[in-house]
Image (cartoon, helix red, strand yellow):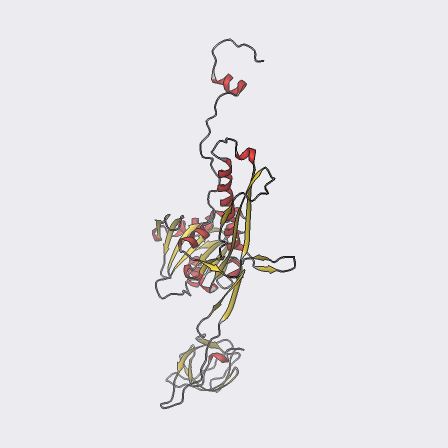
Amino acid sequence: MAEPQTGIRGVKYAAGTEDSLVRDVAARIALLQPDDAPLLAFINGLKSKSVAHNPKFEWFEDELIPNSCTIAGTEAGGSTDFALTSGQGVRIKVNDLLISNTGEAILVTAISTDALTVKRSMGGVAATAYIALDEFVIAGTAMLEGANAPTSVWQGKVSKNNFIQIFRDIVELTVTQANSESYGGNDRTFQRMKKAMEHKRQIEQAFLFGDGFEDTSGAQTRRGTTGVLNFVTTNVTDFGGVITEGEFEAFMRTVFRYHPTVSAPEKWFLCSPILISALNFWAKNALQVTQDVKTFGVRITKYRSGHGDLNITRHWLLEDFTEFKQYGFVLDPENIKYRFLQNLDTKLHTDIQQKQEEVHRDEYRTHAGLMLLQERTHGVAKGVTGFAA
C-alpha cells in the first residue's frame, strides 16, 4: 500500500512514482521511410500495367537494318575488292552506294558473304586507301533505269522474356493484441499499413536490381523477375568517382539516341541523392520544378536539354546501399511496363489463419514482373561519388 504524502501534489509524483498521468502520444505514429517506391509510382501514373497470362511472359523486339558498315582490313586506293567486318555483308545489296569518310562514292556490284566487289569513285571524290574498321555510310541503291527489283533485305525480330515473381508478406497478431487499445490507433490497421509499404518496397527493389531466373529443381517452380540493372547493358556509364557536367552531357547523348516516338523525347531519371546534388550544382537555371502528386505521387524536377527532357525524381532507397547510392536509372516511359498475373495483382488477404488459432493473420500477395523493352532506350549511370564543374 502507498504511504501518505505531505505537501503539494504535482506532476512529478503522478508521472514518476504512480505512473498515473495520461501520456500525450500523437494519434499518428511517425514512420521513418513512408514511401520508397518512385518507380512503381511512375509506372502506375503512366497506367503502364497489363495482365500476363503465364508466369513467363514474352515479347518481340525489332529494329531497322544498320545504316553503316566497316571494312576488315586495309584496302588500297585502287582496290575493287572490299572485305567487310564479319557478319556485315547481309546489310548490303548489289547496287548499293557506300560513302566513305572522305566522301568517296563506291558502288557495290557483287556480294559473296562479307566480300564485296565494288566500283570506285563514282562521283567527283577520288579513290583513296582505307584501313581496318574505317566506316562507310550505306546510302541506298543507285539503280539502272529499267532494272529488275533489288534483292530484299530485312531485319529479323528478337524474342525477349521475363518472369512473374511471387511476393508475399504476412501481418500476424494475437487476437488479444488486435483487440487491445493502442496508442496511434488500431494496431492491426497500423501494422497492415506498414507492411504494405514494405511489400511495395520489395517489389521496387526487384524491379530495379533483380536478376531473372526460373528454378524448376524443387517440388514447385520458383521464379525471379529481371530488373532494370540487368536489362540495360548498352547505355551503362561508369563515372568512376567525380562526375563533371561535360561527362553528364555525354551520358545524355547516349540515353536520348533512341526513342520510340517521333515527338520530343522525354525520359525519367531516378536519381541517388548525389546525382541530384550534381544537377543542382551545374544547372539551376535549366531545372524546372513541377508538382504532379495527383498523377505520380512524387515530386518531379524537369531538366531541359537540347537532347530531350529528363523528369528527375530523387530515389532515397538507393541511399540505403553502399554500391547503389552511386547510381541513377534513366527510363523511357514508352518502353517500361508492369506485368501481373491475371487476377493476382497486389491484394490483401485477411484472416487466413486456421480456425483453431487465436491469431489474426493477413497476407499481402503480388504476382508481378517487369517488362522493359528496347534496352537501348534506357540508361544506367553508376560509380558517382562526387561532382565538379
| Residue placed most toward the observer, 249 or 363 | 363
Q: Position of residue 82 (x, y in %)?
A: 50, 83
Q: Confirm whether residue 173 shows in the render.
A: yes
Which quadrant is home to the N terminus?
top right
Whether residue 228 is situated above or below residue 194 in the rendered picture: below
Front-lying residue, 238 or 322? 322
At 50% from the left edge and 18% from the top edge, which residue is drawn?
14
Q: Residue furthest bottom?
A: 146
Q: Is residue 3 left or right of residue 386?
A: right
Residue 121 on image: x %, y %:
41, 85
Q: Along the line of sight, which residue is nearer the eye, 150 or 112?
A: 150
Q: Is residue 275 above or below residue 130?
A: above
Q: Is residue 58 left or right of residue 303?
A: right
- Determine which quarter of the picture holds residue 27: top left
Q: Is residue 389 visible?
A: no
Image spot of residue 152 (x, y percent): 44, 82
Q: Quadrant of residue 66?
A: bottom left
Residue 102: x %, y % from top left: 41, 78
Please identify the residue farthest to the top as the structure is shown: 6
